[in-house]
Structure formats: structure tokens, C-alpha cells
Image (cartoon, rainbow, N blue to C red):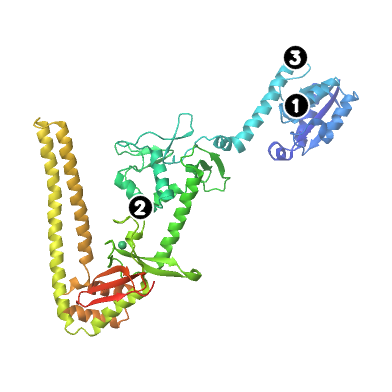
Amino acid sequence: MRVAVYARVSSEDQAERGTIENQLEFARKYCDLHELDVVEWYRDDGVTGTIPLEMRDEGRRLLEDAKAGRFELLLIYRLDRLGRSARIILNAVYDLEQHGVKIRSMTEPFDTGDPNGRFLLTILAGVADLERETILERMWYGANRAARAGKWLGGIVPYGYRVNEEGYLEVNEDPLPGMDMSEADVVRLIYRLIADQGYSTIKVADYLNALGVPPSYTKDGRQIKRGKRKVNTAGIWRPGRIRNMVVNTTYKGIHYYGKRTNKKRELIPREVPALVTEETWEKAQQVLHDNQLESMKNAKRQYLLRGLIKCGVCGLTYHGTAYGGPGGKPKAYYVCGGKTAYRGPLDGKCTSKNVPQEWIEDMVWQSCVDFINNPGDAIKELAASMEERKSQKAALTAELEMVKNAAKEKEVEKQSILDLYRKRIIGSVDVEQQLQQIAREKAALDQRAKDLEKQIEAEECLAQQFDTAEELLADLKAKLEANPPFEVRREIVRALVKEIIIDTKPGDNGRPRAIVTARYTFSKVVTRTARDS
Ligand SMILES: [Zn+2]
């Protein structure tokens, strides 16, 4: 029987499985042992098994020689030398058999010369193929393909979603404990507040905390697992968390897989169920962006009269704001809080005029400096004011005490109502009514307590630290001479300014003008009309 030997290594194989010489050496020994005569050697060195036999240099020569009838048996080291897929192996076997050539693997138990061998060949060719597929899939495509198909592959499950039994992300519409809302509803609410109503993340966090919405699903206050990580379920909504949620593309239906790893890795976008429309999502990004610009503008400026100016039209406090002026230069104003949307009795429609920051601050500061340098008889007024402030603070503190006690009393009232109910003296309808009434009263008391605490805090200024007006004045004078920085000027202003009221009235030409009335602790009342702003 005339025998041929075919050997092949791909460039990758060489490192792992030795060179082509190993296969040829094996074949020589094999033929010696089995007393076979080799008529020709074929060696495809550095050729991949993914291309068909007839397209390899030596493979083509092998087929031509087979066709010419130069040999009857082909020896191969292993089946996968013929090819790396079942199709290529079986095609090669078929082509060779067309020319009456049998194939024998020197290391595997088959020979195409017998039926069992042929069957085994088919199986082994199939296994080789499958093995290759599996290896490739594991190495390259496995995780990615599953991710593209939408499977959740671990990590914290985003708020508003859950992972179902099949391992896919789905919208979580389960009502939160004790609430009519689901996590998904909370997410939709957050986007609505920001995109449609321009809420800041701080305002949203305050609102969710006031509603008592738990930041994540919590059962008996225990830690729960969201994905792989354990998270502490206690706590409150914070603006940073709201921001992170709003910028998360998952909520518009696109989740980027792979972004959490430190290693460089492909980011795979995949579709997940959306909670908000693309339009709403984009709008919310815009609002976040605008709000950030606004706060950056304001952060650069310090407002000397912060909290000291009241609106004569609606009663709310003026606050500092910078607008982009002509040429992109921001101009700073004090603006009534009642003009900001959704605040105050006039619901964002206060008609008060804005006042330029520089103008009103210069005016107030100059009055303070004049007084410190030439107090004259006004020092008596200052002394009286200091006494008044002290007694005012005492009065406020006393009221706060009383309000707090009254709030505590409400708790006692609640208990007695429940006692009456337990003793079956009153019915459930009455209980309900009484408890609601008590809750309303308690809420009003709590609000008053908060207001009082704020007022008391506002009263705590430099003036409180001195027993006499002379001592205070000496201190102010020393500060003034040291060219005071903003914080110290602010201290001086707080010690000397009682309040500033801005009225808005029609001027001579019929257009509204701002009229500023400043009251000082040294009793000089200054009224000025603002230049046209
Ligand atoms: Zn106003």
C-alpha cells in the first residue's frame, strides 16, 4: 500500500504544539512500526485550519496527487490537521475518497477504511467544530452576547427596576411599603419634577424626603441585596443621588454594559425597558445643565445683604442673582423670592423691581461707615436697639419653649384619644377625625418652631456679644480700620442693619421704580429711590 503523510501547523499552533517536525517525526516512527512505505510528504507550515484543504499550497498538491492515484492511504497526526471545522474536515475526506484514498489518524482510533471509523470520523469532526465554537464563544462572545440580549449580569440593579427569574431587567411596579407609588413611579416623578417644572436636585430630594419615600426597597430595615452588592437601605434622598439617577441612560432604555470595570473594555449598549421617553430624558439633562450654570454664576458672588432685604409687595426675602448682561458680563441684582416660580403668595408673579447689587450695597455700607465714624447721639439709639434685640431674642426663645411644649402635649392628646377608643367610649370614626385634627395642629406647631429657630439664629450677631453700645462701636471701628474682608463687612452690616424693605411704586414717568427703605439699629432711617435698573 502506498502511503502519504500530511502535516500542518498554524502559526498559533507552533508555540503550543511544537513545530511541524514533531508531526513528521511521529509519522516516521508510526510507519516504521506498521511497516508502511511513505511515497510523499506534504507539509503546510504556518497555515490555518480554517481555510479549505484545496486552498492550502501543500493541500492542493496533495489533492492533485490523490487524483493522479499516487497513493491509497493518507496518514495524519490528528483529525484537526485536516481542518478546524466539521465542514472543512468532511469536505477534505470526501474529496480524497472520491479518488480512492483512505484516511487514518495516527493518534485517534479511526480509519475511514471501515464503517465504524467513518461514523467516528463524523462525530469527531463535529466535536472539533463544537469545541472550537465553544472556545471562541467563551473567549470573545460569551458574556457580550448575553449582555446584548438584555440579560442582567450583576451589579446594582437601578432603582425602579428588578431582575426577573429569567435574569432580565424589568420595570418594578410593586408598590413601595405603605405607599401608593412604586419605584418606577418615583423615577417618573423625579424626571417630571426636573424636566417639566425645573426643580433642582436639592428640591427634588427635599420633596421625596417630605413624602417619606424610602430611597430603596427596605424590609424591616435590613440590608438587602441589589445585584451583587449589599446596600444599606436606611437613609434619605440626597441631591447627588438624584443627579446620578437623572443622568443614567438606563431610564431612557439604554444600558451600557461593561462601564463598571477598571480594565479597558468595550462599552456595549443594549436595550432595556425605558421608564421615561427620550424627550423627557433629554429635557431633564438640559435643566440639570442650566441649573449648574446658574449656581456657578452665583457661587462666584457674595451678597453683603443676604437675608436682610424684604419685598414690600409680597413680603418674601430678596436674594442675590447674577444675569448675563450685555457682552456676556453678568450683572448682579437682588431679586424678590416671590418672582421665582412656585413660591410665595403671588405664585411666581410678584411685580417687584430688581435692585442692582452694587448700588444698594454701596448705599447701605456707606451709611454704616458714616455712623461708625460719627456716631454722635445715635449711639444712644444703638444702645436702645441692643437692649431691644436682647429682649426680643429672649421673647423668641420663650415662645419657642412654649411651642415645643405644646407640640409634646399633642402626643399626650393622641394617647388619650386612643385610650378612649380602647375603652370603647368613642367610635372609630371619631378617633379618625380627632387624630387628623391633632396631626394638623402638631404640624402647625412644628412649623412655628422652625420659624422661631430661624429668627433666633438671625438675631445672633455681633451686637449680642457686647454689653454696651460703646464697646460694640469700638470693636466696629477697629474692624473698619483694618480694611475688612467680606466676612467682617457682613458682620458689621448684620450688627447695624435692622431691615431693608424694597417697595415698588410707579415713578414720575409711570414706570415702576424700586424705593428702598433701610432701618438701622442706630435708628437712622434712609429712604432712597433706585436708579433705573
Ligand atoms: Zn415680592
How much space separates mark 3 and mark 1, taking CA atoms?
A: 17 Å
**Along the line of sight, the residue nearer the viewer: 78 or 222:** 222
First along the sequence among labels 1 and 2: 1
Which amino acid does the dot numbered 3 rest on? Pro
First along the sequence among labels 3 and 2: 3
Asked whether mark 3 and ligand 1 are closer than 8 Å, the reply comes as no
Asked whether mark 2 and ligand 1 are closer than 8 Å, the reply comes as no
Residue 469 position within the rendered picture, expressed as x and y whole percent measured from the top left:
16, 78
Which amino acid does the dot numbered 1 rest on? Ile
**Along the line of sight, the residue nearer the viewer: 481 or 13:** 481
Mark 2 = which residue?
Answer: 203
Helix, strand or loop at label 2? It is helix
Q: Say if 1 sits above or below 352 in the image.
A: above
**Residue mark closest to the camera, 3 vs 1:** 1
**Along the line of sight, the residue nearer the viewer: 525 or 134:** 525
Mark 1 = which residue?
Answer: 89
Which amino acid does the dot numbered 2 rest on? Lys
How much space separates mark 1 and mark 2, taking CA atoms?
A: 69 Å
